Image (cartoon, rainbow, N blue to C red):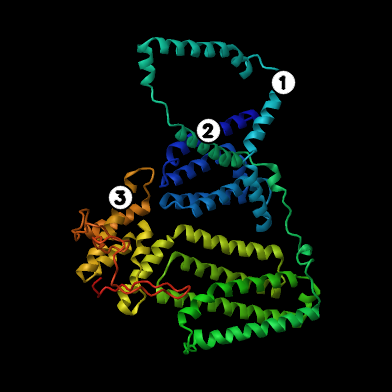
Amino acid sequence: MNRHGSLVAKLGSALALIVLAEILIADGNGAVVGGFAFAWIIALVLTRRVIWNDGAALLALIAGAGLAVVLVDDPSVLGWVLFWTAISLAALLPRHRFDDALAWMRRLGWHAMSAVVAPLKDAARLSMVHQRRGPPSGGIRAIGAVVALPLVGGAVFVGLFANANPLIGQAFSRIVLPDPWAVTWRTVFGLCVLVTVWASLRPSRRTTRASRIDERSIGMAFEPGVATLILSLVTFNAIFAVENALDIAFLWSGAGLPAGVTMADYAHRGAYSLIVTALLAAMFVLLALRPGSAAAASPLVRRLVTVWIVQNLLLVASSALRTLDYVDAYGMTVLRLSALAWMGLVATGLALIGWRLLARKSAAWLINANALAAVTVLVAASVVDLGATAAAWNVRTTLARGKAGPPLDLCYMARLGSSSLVSLAMLERHAKRAGLRDRLAYLRWENQTETADAQADWRRWTPRNARRLATVRAMFGTNAPRLQSAPDGRNCAGLILPPLSVEGPSAPSSAPAPQMPSPGIPAPKPLTLGAQQ
C-alpha cells in the first residue's frame, strides 16, 4: 500500500471509530466500552502493520487486549487510562525501544498533548501537498463556487414561498430539528474521539525523542560531603528509632496508652503523615547517594543508609498496622483499602532503593522496577472491584463478630451502588430481627432495581452486574419484598423517617443534643445482626 493509500485507510478507520463511538459509548458506559476498545485495536493492527514486526509493540498490544477484556467485564476510568497507555505504547514502540519508564512517561505525556493538534497538522500537510501539485480542476473550492449561488438563491426563495403559502409553511413546521445542545455534545465527543484515535494511527515523531536518564545529573544539585551525610544519617536514625520504639511499645505489643490518648487517635492520626516521612526519606537517599558518588562508596554511609531504610520499612509497616486497627474499629472503605495498597507500594519502593544501593544498580533499573510495581497494583485495582471488596469485608466481619465487630455503615454500603448488592443480600439473608431485615430488604431492593434498570440498557450492560443480579435473584427471586409502610420515606440507612411535626420546624425538641465526634474520628451508629434497628 502506498503512502496515500495508507493515509486514506487511517482516515477511514478513524471515521469508522468515531461513528462506532457515537453509537456505543456516547450515551453508555457498559460492556460496549470494551467493544470499542477491541475495535480500536483492530484498526491499529490493520493500518499499522509495523507493529507486527516489533516484539515490544506486539506485547503492549496484547496487554491492551487484556485490558479491553477488563473494560468489557466492568468499565472504569482507571481501566480506560491503562488501556490508553498500552495502546499508545504499541503505537510508539516501533519507533523507539523501551529504555526507562521515566523517559516513556515524558513520551506518553507529549503524545497526549500533541494529539490535540495532530489532525490539524496532518490536514495542513495534505493541503500543502495538493498545492504543490497545482490547482485541481475539481477541488472543493471549485465545487463550492459552482453550487454556492444555487444553494443560497434556492434557500431565499423557499423561505419566501413558505411565508406566502400556508401549505408549504405547515410542511416546514412539521420538521423537527435536532436539539442544538445534543448536536454540540455529539460534535465535541466526535472530535475528542478523533483526537484520541488519530494520535495512535499517526503518532508524532517528536514523541520518541525524549532522552533517557542521565545518572550523572541526578543529585548534582544536592551533593553534601561525606561528613555531613554521616552526621545527618546518625541524627535521622536516632529520631526514627524513637518513633519506631513508641510504635513497638504501644501499637505492636498492645500496651495501654497514656491517659487522654485513644487507640483510634493513635492509629488514625499518624497513618498518612508517616507515609510522607518515608517518602521524604526515600527522596533523600536518591538525591544524596547516587551510585558512583563519594558518599555511596563509604562503607559507614552505606551501613547507616541500610539501617535507615530498615527503619523506614518498619515505619511503613506501623502505618499499615495503624490503618488496619482503624479498619478494625470503624470498618473498611475504598479509601482505606487504597491507602493499604499505596503503603505496600511505598514499602516496595524503599526495598528497591536499598537493593539498588547495595547491588549498585542503575537509576533506570530503579525507575523501571518501581514502574512495574505501580502498574501491577493499578492493573489489579482495575480488575478487582474495590467497592465490592470493602462491602464484602464489612459484611463478613459483622456476621462473624456481631456486636464485638466494627459498626456497619449502611449509608456507605448504599452509596457503593451495585458493588454492594451481593453483600447487602447476604446480610439480609442472615438478619434475625424483623426491623433490621426490613431495612436491609429496602436497601437491597433499591440497589437491585437500579442495577436491573441499568442492565436493561444495552449500552450500560456489563457481565459483572449480570452475575451480581443472577446471584441475588437466585437468593430472593425477582418479586419486590414486603416492606413496612413508610409514608414519609426512609433515610440512607433504610430507617423509616418519622412524620413531620405539626408544630412546624420551630417547635422545641425534647431530644438530647447529639454528641459531636472528636476531630478525625467518625461516630457511626452501631449495627449488629442481633439488635433491633
**Residue named by callout 1:** 133
For label 3, the SS is: helix
For label 1, the SS is: loop
Query: Which mark is in front, 3 or 1?
Result: 3
Q: Quadrant of the C terminus?
A: bottom left
- Indicate the position of residue 510 as horizontal and vertical percent values: 28, 72
Mark 2, other Cα within 10 Å: few <14 / some 14–19 / many ≥20: some
Query: 227 or 378: which is nearer to us?
Result: 227
Give the number of marks: 3
Is label 2 in contact with label 1 (beta carbons under 8 Å)? no
Query: Which label's residue is closer to the chain start, 3 or 2?
Result: 2
**Residue named by callout 3:** 452
Residue 247 appearing in the image = yes
Query: Which label's residue is closer to the chain start, 2 or 1?
Result: 2
Q: Amino acid at mark 3?
A: Ala
Res. 15 mark? 2
Query: Which label's residue is closer to the chain start, 3 or 1?
Result: 1
